[in-house]
Image (spheres, grey):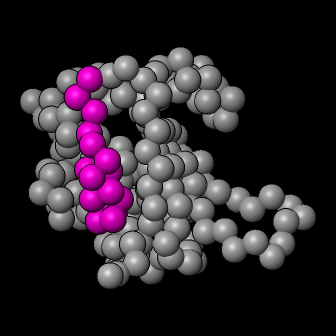
């Protein structure tokens, strides 16, 4: 039996309907990590299997975290918290990628506003957050272009249209 690439801890801390199931999250993340590894080589050197937590939250929790960590006092679609080993701890064999915190209500609102299917937008947010955990960012234009191109490739592999196309 093949060792899994990662172990997923899925935490549902909201009452939203129509949430993706655990297998969806696993498929989206596995596809993202496999394609990222093929195209660019893994930005983080991870032993396998590594741990990743996806926590689905209400707007209040998203807003509090977004305010505390980004200084933005509003809920947001996805927050990524890459794991960093605390100073002074040595000798532990931890392979934790990090945490994604996704606000179900914001994802649903954005999908409707952007005229996307809810499942497609969930996939995009999970892929986007997963790439952040691997070290990708979109602060600088060249970083944004690299990250967005990778997202488009990953989503295409999943049968999902380019999320950056403008829809009428």
Residue that appears at 90% across and 64% down: 88
Q: What residue is shown at x 42% (from left), y 23% (from top)?
A: 14
Q: Is residue 157 visible from the viewing direction of this image?
A: yes
Furthest-front residue in this view: 1
Image side of residue 117 versus residue 99, left or right: left
Q: Is residue 46 above or below residue 21?
A: below
Q: Position of residue 151 (x, y in %)?
A: 31, 58
Q: Quadrant of the N terminus?
A: bottom left
Residue 43 against residue 163 in the figure, above or below? below
x%, y% of residue 56?
Answer: 43, 34
Instruction: Give the dominant element type of the magenta stretch: helix, strand or loop.
Output: helix
Residue name at image x 43 percent, y 33 percent: 12
Residue displayed at 15% across by 35% down: 117
Asked if the magenta segment contains residue 23, the reply would be yes
**Residue at the limit of the structure toward the right, as seen here:** 88
Residue 65, horizontal then vertical, whole percent = 61, 30
Image quadrant of residue 67?
A: top right
Q: Is residue 116 shown in magenta?
A: no
Task: Look at the image and tell me whether residue 43 can be seen.
Answer: no
Frontmost residue, 145 versus 63:
63
Question: In x, y percent, where is residue 163?
Answer: 23, 46
Q: Is residue 141 left or right of residue 72?
A: left
| In the image: residue 39, left or right of residue 80 | left
Classify the position of the C terminus by image quarter.
Answer: top left
Q: Which residues are magenta?
A: 17-32
Q: How many marks?
A: 0
Q: Is residue 100 above or below residue 50?
A: above
């Amino acid at each position: 039996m093949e060792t899994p690439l990662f172990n997923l801890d899925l935490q549902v801390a909201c009452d939203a309907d129509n949430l993706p199931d655990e297998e969806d999250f696993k498929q989206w993340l596995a596809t993202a990590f496999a394609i990222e590894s093929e195209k660019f080589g893994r930005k983080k050197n991870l032993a396998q299997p590594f741990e990743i937590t996806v926590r689905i939250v209400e707007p209040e929790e998203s807003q509090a975290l977004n305010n505390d960590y980004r200084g933005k006092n509003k809920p947001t679609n996805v927050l990524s918290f890459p794991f960093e080993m605390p100073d002074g701890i040595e000798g532990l064999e931890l392979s934790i990628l990090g945490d994604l915190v996704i606000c179900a209500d914001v994802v649903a609102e954005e999908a409707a506003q952007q005229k996307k299917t809810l499942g497609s937008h969930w996939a995009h947010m999970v892929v986007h957050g997963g790439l952040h955990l691997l070290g990708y960012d979109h602060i600088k234009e060249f970083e944004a272009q690299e990250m967005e191109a990778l997202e488009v490739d990953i989503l295409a592999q999943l049968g999902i249209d380019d999320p950056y196309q403008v829809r009428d």
